[in-house]
Amino acid sequence: MAMKRILITGGAGFIGSNLCDYFTHKGYEVTCLDNFATGFRHNIEPLLSLPNFKLIEGDIREVETCRKACEGQDYVLHQAALGSVPRSLDDPATTNAVNVDGFLNMLVATRDAGVKRFVYAASSSTYGDSEKLPKVEEVIGKPLSPYAVTKYVNELYADVFSKVFGLECIGLRYFNVFGRRQNPNGAYAAVIPKFVIQLMNHDSPVINGEGDYSRDFTYIDNVVQMNERAMLTENPEAINQVFNTAVGDQTTISETAELLRNLLSTYDPEIASVPIKHGPVRAGDVPHSKASIAKAERLLGYSPSHHFEEGLQEAVQWYWENL
């Protein structure tokens, strides 16, 4: 196993750093490619002194950087992207440049380097305006944001490279991933870490709309498991497929805020009295999201290790101890 080499793009980010940590400690030769636009050096700092971990500081928008990073790799776990629906509404051009041009650069570099398999971060945003629940991989709607467009284009490109060039590609449609190392700061912070930091500071979380929108929140350990299963599967039926990466739960934003307030109040009783407020509905948001994980269970042997409340307890503990 120590001879197997993995390139993890976006490896200093939230999901990428968890993947770097997991696979480095399992004995793989891990290369992290990151430009630190949204990732942080401190996420991978403990790995930098390890002999089987290497950092390449570079941008996936530069094809030569991608080629250098792909040399000699057995697998690519492509996590590098500009996330956030609001960010894509504010700056669709940069989102497209990173998420589409950068993605294509990585596909070309992976193909030309003879890498065995390309596993990439897809997104539940691809389901767009489809109202069907639970979400099944074969039924999508029209995208509701520039970000969603870019993630759907990724799937189309991966499909073409698999069919035309024989590159083994597997896409993982992430559903609202949360957990340790997810950045709570900044204008584009995800809802769970954002609410956590606000409550810890005794500031009122602001829910967009009535709070009845729902999500299939997915703890980071489930995402790590899916990446490992997709990378190592020997099931030919799983190749050139996309898989929901989720739990199959459904929790409203209001329920999430209440759960966070209750969990955090065990550390600081004053948090229990912090009021939760409401604001306008946010443009580009999908009203409801719940995944079917039947395909991942059948073809990859996936079984979530954490349901929502279990993951939330671990995440809250991590934030309390590290912020």
Image: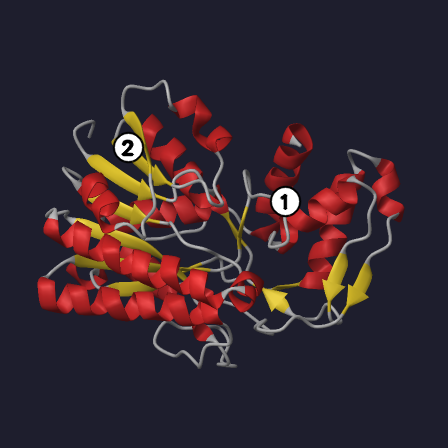
Q: How many marks?
A: 2
Q: Nearer the viewer, residue 125 or 189?
A: 189
Judge whether 288 appears above or below 181 on screen: below
Q: Nearer the viewer, residue 116 or 72?
A: 72
The residue located at (24%, 64%) in the rendering is 158
Residue 258 position within the rendered picture, expressed as x and y whole percent measured from the top left: 76, 54
Residue 9 position within the rendered picture, expressed as x and y whole percent measured from the top left: 33, 44
Residue type at mark 1 is: Pro
Instruction: Tell me which corner region of the image, top left, top right, bottom left or bottom right, holds residue 138.
Output: bottom left
The residue located at (18%, 39%) in the rendering is 73
Residue type at mark 2 is: Val
Q: Mark 2 highlights which residue?
A: 30
Q: What element carries label 2?
A: strand
Judge whether 151 appears above or below 118 on screen: below
Q: How has the structure been colored for display?
A: secondary structure
Instruction: Tell me which corner region of the image, top left, top right, bottom left or bottom right, holds residue 250.
Output: bottom right
Whether residue 305 can be seen here: no
Q: Which of 170 and 105 is in front in this view?
A: 105
Residue 18 position within the rendered picture, expressed as x and y whole percent measured from the top left: 43, 38
Separation of disc 1 and disc 2 at Cα? 27 Å
Q: Mark 1 highlights which residue?
A: 184
Q: Estimate how packed mark 1 is, as few (under 14), some (14 to 19) or many (20 or more) residues with alpha carbons within 10 Å.
A: some
Tell me the quadrant of the picture where the C terminus can be found. top right
Which of pointers 1 and 2 lies earlier in the amino acid sequence? 2
The residue located at (50%, 73%) in the rendering is 145
Q: Estimate how packed mark 2 is, as few (under 14), some (14 to 19) or many (20 or more) residues with alpha carbons within 10 Å.
A: many
Whether residue 79 can be seen here: yes
